[in-house]
């Protein structure tokens, strides 16, 4: 049923080196996936969907030939806070674009993601808020599991354009997380995501969830930690066995003049960079570092020139991709722990 | 004294096909020069200048290896309107960036352009306002000629990094324009610009100035019409013998969703493009037209995505460069008039 293959190539402790194989190309894991917000349901009207359908899917519309993962809209609905109402059937909310009343069900989310033609589609779920009592977290998780089942039936009702992932919920409660995992395994998803984290919980709570959940996830399925995160969050999650990540941080930080280096984040707006003819990071091989100085990037930012956002984004995405490349090489070589040690030493 | 050569390769009526040869590369004329506003004096503080000096000039600062032409700041001071005061010595004004009092003289403008390391520097002049009486236009032009002489002396006081152009002023008065030209020829500039046009005068007034001035300009020097303009303005000016153009129009229009086609300008915000899977212009070879549809560009614009500005700018600059390439080929082939005829027929 699935058009995706996952091969586990090496393990180093709990850290995994793998490969996701799609018709449109191969993704080496651990992998970081840059986020393109305006491809999501959040800013989409039914009219937009027609346009994308006329292009035979998102790939041709946005001129991207390699694999695309789309979110279901569940998290996006959740982020609307007061503007939404959840029922057994689905989510009622007001469009943040034009204020129109919208109803999104698991079935409708799957129909949309099928039209988009994504290589990986995500289950439509309710993101459990933080904090939540165990009772609240259970009610929310159980609803998400019923939605996951309805979505799975819809997505695979005819030849699908890609693969549907299930999303583990259950808040910070390890028992609920394990129940959620069992429910998704029962349905039969080919890939598993961990949702409802990075929503306000402490780092200790997050790591505890991962530590109890990871050993129970099947080895042969890819594991995707949604919405995480900072470079140090990625290192910690890889250490616990995560394969896939996404986060707006490198692109959003770039537009706000925050640039990643091995030593930590620098703010290019800082007056200290005013006369600095050095690149963002010595030794970095990205187009921006090879050709432009910190003082030029500061000048572009000061003038509000969009070239600045572009060059900053090139650097930050390169930084994340280099980090993932290094992590993959370290796992393959069985040296992940010493790599992580160097990673933290440089930031100290 | 000049590090620039100008070769006249062909003529077709008054239209000229030429070549400007600089140490940094060759520019085929008629040529259109895209404008980079934030490289100009307008947004520059003395501090910025030090940064550029630390980069050994503008080329390394902005990572541009080919020829650069810089304006003197004269037009930029003029555009400040009420915020400026002109004396024999120079221009006093308030910085639009931080409100600080600034004094810019012909000598200071030359020192700045020398630090920038531009391949072509422009004389510091006063732009004659429109409308102006003949008396006002004469007073202003004569001041500009004294400034041109002072600037020339300063620019060539030691080995210059490029070539200084003089700027013909005189408003819409042909007699004053010819006097100004004679004064610049007396000083000995290697290139000649026509300033103070596109400031509110009628098209008939502008064409009359060009028609009376052009036959009197020496054949062997490049002629630069400053700040012009629309594709049809360029065709008309080439017909009268202009070699060089600059204008913010292709880049500014792109950011405002106005896109050039052979049939005329389209506004990509228009709802008509909502479902349109066609490129901006059928047959256009630019990166944007080869890969993206009108509906995708409309979507990016609607979402405020900066990728939209980028893709629109790629197309508009490509359009201008293709126009100039076609104009040059037509002059070389002796078919400029029939090219101009087709140009207008497509727009009708």
Image: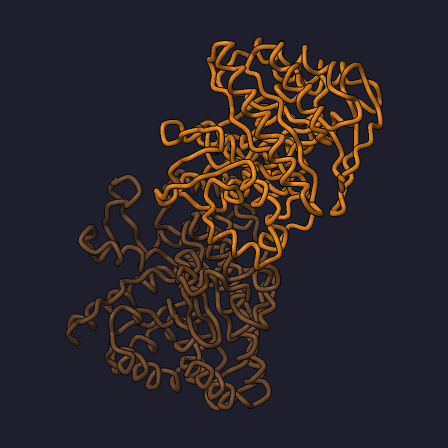
Chain colours: A orange, B brown
**Viewed as shown, does residue A68 lie left or right of B295?**
right
| Position of residue B214 measured from the top left corner of the image (x, y, whole percent) | 38, 83
Residue A305, horizontal then vertical, whole percent: 44, 46
Residue B242 to residue B41: above or below? below
Residue closest to the eye, A238 or B9: A238
Question: On the rendered image, what quadrant is the C terminus of chain A found in?
Answer: top right
Query: On screen, B63 above or below B291?
Result: above
Where on the picture, by quarter, is residue A340?
A: top right
Q: Nearer the viewer, residue A106 or A211?
A: A106
Number of marks in the rendered image: 0
Q: Is residue A338 left or right of residue A120?
A: right
Between A338 and A299, the one lying in front of the other is A338
Q: Nearer the viewer, residue B295 or B337?
A: B295
Residue A313 percent location from the top left of the image: 55, 39
Image position, residue B25 (x, y; %): 61, 63
Q: Residue B194: name its quadrant.
A: bottom left
- For the point 62% across and 15% down, the residue is A177
- In the depicted structure, whether residue A184 falls above or below residue B261: above
In this rendering, position of residue B77 left or right of residue B49: left
**Image quadrant containing the N terminus of chain A:** top right
Residue occupying the point 26% across, 74% down: B170
Residue at image location 76% in from the left, 14% down from the top: A337
Report if residue B248 is visible in the image. Answer: no
* In the image: residue B189, left or right of residue A215: left
Name the residue at 62% across, 40% down. Answer: A154
Q: Is residue A339 visible?
A: yes
């Amino acid at each position: 049923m699935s058009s995706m293959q996952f091969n586990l190539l090496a393990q180093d402790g709990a850290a995994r080196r793998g490969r996701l194989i799609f018709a449109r190309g191969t993704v080496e894991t651990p992998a970081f996936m840059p986020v393109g917000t305006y491809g999501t349901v959040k800013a989409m009207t039914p009219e937009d969907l027609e346009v994308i359908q006329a292009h035979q899917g998102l790939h041709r519309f946005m001129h991207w030939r390699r694999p695309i993962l789309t979110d279901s809209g569940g998290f996006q609905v959740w982020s609307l806070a007061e503007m939404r109402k959840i029922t057994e059937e689905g989510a009622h909310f007001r469009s943040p674009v034009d204020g129109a009343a919208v109803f999104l069900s698991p079935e409708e989310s799957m129909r949309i993601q099928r039209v988009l033609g994504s290589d990986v589609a995500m289950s439509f779920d309710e993101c459990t808020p933080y904090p939540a009592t165990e009772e609240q977290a259970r009610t929310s998780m159980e609803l998400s599991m019923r939605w996951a089942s309805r979505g799975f039936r819809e997505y695979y009702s005819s030849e699908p354009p890609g693969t549907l992932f299930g999303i583990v919920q259950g808040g910070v409660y390890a028992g609920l997380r394990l129940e959620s995992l069992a429910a998704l395994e029962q349905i039969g998803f080919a890939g598993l995501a961990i949702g409802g984290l990075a929503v306000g919980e402490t780092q200790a709570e997050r790591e505890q969830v991962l530590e109890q959940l990871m050993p129970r996830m099947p080895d042969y399925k890819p594991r995707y930690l949604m919405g995480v995160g900072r470079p140090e969050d990625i290192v910690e999650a890889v250490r616990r066995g995560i394969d896939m990540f996404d986060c707006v941080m490198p692109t959003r930080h770039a537009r706000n003049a925050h640039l990643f280096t091995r030593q930590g984040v620098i703010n290019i707006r800082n007056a200290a960079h005013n006369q600095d003819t050095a690149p963002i990071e010595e030794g970095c091989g990205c187009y921006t570092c090879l050709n432009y100085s910190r003082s030029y990037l500061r000048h572009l930012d000061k003038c509000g020139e969009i070239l600045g956002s572009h060059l900053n984004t090139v650097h930050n995405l390169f930084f994340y991709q280099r980090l993932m490349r290094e992590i993959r090489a370290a796992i393959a070589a069985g040296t992940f722990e010493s790599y992580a040690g160097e990673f933290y030493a440089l930031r100290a």
